[in-house]
Amino acid sequence: MRVSVDRWRRAPASPWQRGAVAAVTGALPALAFPEPSLWWLAPVALVPWLLLIRSAPTGRRAAFDGWLGGAGFMLAVHHWLLPSLHVFTLVVALLLGALWLPWGLLVRRLLGGAPGRWRATAALVLVPSGWLMVELVRSWENLGGPWGLLGASQWQVPVALRLASLGGVWLVSFLIVAVNTALALLIALPAARRAAVAGVAVCAAAAGAAWAWAPLPDRTGSVRIALVQPGVVDGVGSPDARFDREEALTRKLAGRDADLIVWGESSVGTDLADRPDLQRRLTALARETGAALLVNVDAPRSDRPGIYKSSVLVGPDGPDAGRYDKMRLVPFGEYIPARSLLGWATSVGKAADEDRRRGTAPVVMTVPGAQGLRIGPLICFETAFPDMSRHLVKEGAAVLTAQSSTSTFQHSWAPEQHASLAALRAAETWRPMMHATLTGVSAVHGPRGEPVGGRLGTDSSTAAVYDVPLATGWSPYVRFGDWVVYGSVAALVLYGAAEVARSVRRPAPGPGSPPARTAHGSAARPRR
């Protein structure tokens, strides 16, 4: 049965229907992320939402469609939080969805009615730019951080990883939205077909040029790094039981010539200064295996007040080889923003009863006995922040290490979503990344974002050794930073200035003037 193009242009009549359609169409891009991993859906997933917004009868309705679509996207990407935050997950989705309000207005302004060639061409730049502004604002850690950036859905696509080395995840997001905008123009506006085809061609040419001519990292040998994943420790909630399992798995690495052994987040549940026995056991493991251990302590510190999450490097001489305290905490999971206002979240879900403390600076550590190997540790969702890994590389890190635990969300999309970020950060920085977890998914990616060895799934309790390729040099993204974001800001500012100038130059309508035209090209009815 053939569906006519006119049916695609028809908008739902009822406001309730529009609201439901906006939420569903906004949620579609979530299917491109792990665990569904329908990455090929991303270039078309926004089209239904764009068509809905452009059909809005008023700017207010378009903004509302943007809000509900954004809330649908946020809820779909973070739905695995429901068992922990319950109804508060919906509240957070609605609050973050409001960031798409101005984007909805922008889409209707540029795509609504019958835009000419220049307005259609401008939409191919400005609609993606507006989307990046939403991603930029919600990337602020107090708003939840950059989890679910659209470009991150392409973590296993080699061309996208090459693009990420040029402009970070932002460039990938920009091009995805540009392709969606061009396809929406093709479907809804035959008159703008030439601009739409040109837009798709430009995006394809950019991807082709990146694949053919983008610089590649220079390989400089390899290093042997092991990941220890203890898995779920059934029936025992004690951190000591988990430590025992990790110790036993680590002992099996003796004679494997590893240079570094990485344990997951919260792998040690007591401050080592308070447990000399654990210090001795870890030091003995470093001597027995011939490799330094990077463990993660989640406990109150003895030398200062409060709970910290810390990466601690233990060498053959003890746990004084390096320490990094986590800087960016998970909202509601590790602290509650504005606790006096939002503290009620603890009564409806598993929100943090006590706020953890923040570290003050990133740290690059030199691994003892590994020929000067320097590592840049990140903890948990810090891997979602492109600027953190970029900073560590500029400070001299040769390997990025991520220590994580998604055991609370073991049977959800969360473990796969989190592990996929390692590929993107590696490709952006030309540095391999180790993603070590307690219960999976653990993974290793090389300097181009390529997978190294096998992934450790959520059903694994094991230790694995990887020959990790090293690289030198700075990628264009490390060197030039967020130039795509700055360019998008400039484009939106120029557009805003042009709109203001046009409104100033436009003469006021006088007697006998023809009626004003609406955004859809029809004559506005005079008010009675």
Image (tube, rainbow, N blue to C red):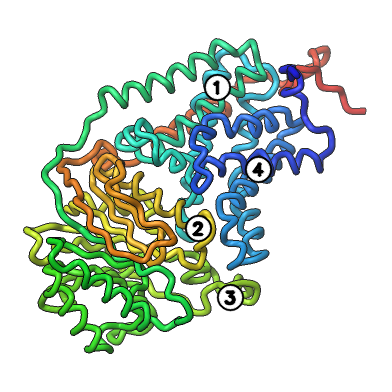
For the C terminus, give its image quadrant.
Answer: top right
Disc 2 residue crowd, few under 14, some 14–19, many 20+, Cα 10 Å: some
Q: How many marks?
A: 4
Which residue shows up at 43% across the image and 19% down it? 202
Horizontally, residue 442 falls left or right of residue 144, namely left
Which residue shows up at 51% across the image and 51% down it? 138
Which residue shows up at 36% across the image and 80% down it? 269
Quick one: label 4 or label 2, which is nearer the N terminus? 4
Considering depth in this image, is 309 or 498 the residue closer to the camera?
Answer: 309
| Image marks 3 and 1: residues in contact by CB distance under 8 Å | no
The type of residue carrying mark 3 is Ser
Q: Which mark is residue 182?
A: 1
Quick one: label 3 or label 2, which is nearer the N terminus? 2
In the displayed structure, would residue 418 be above or below residue 25? below
Callout 3: SS: helix
The type of residue carrying mark 1 is Ala
Q: Which mark is residue 144?
A: 2
Quick one: label 3 or label 4, which is nearer the N terminus? 4
Disc 3 residue crowd, few under 14, some 14–19, many 20+, Cα 10 Å: few
Q: CA distance from mark 3 to mark 4?
A: 30 Å
The type of residue carrying mark 2 is Gly
The answer to whether one can see residue 118 in this image is yes
Q: CA distance from mark 3 to mark 1?
A: 46 Å
Q: CA distance from mark 1 to mark 4?
A: 19 Å
Estimate the x, y position of residue 169 in percent, counting from the top left.
Answer: 39, 40
Q: Which mark is residue 69?
A: 4
Q: Nearer the viewer, mark 3 or mark 1?
A: 1
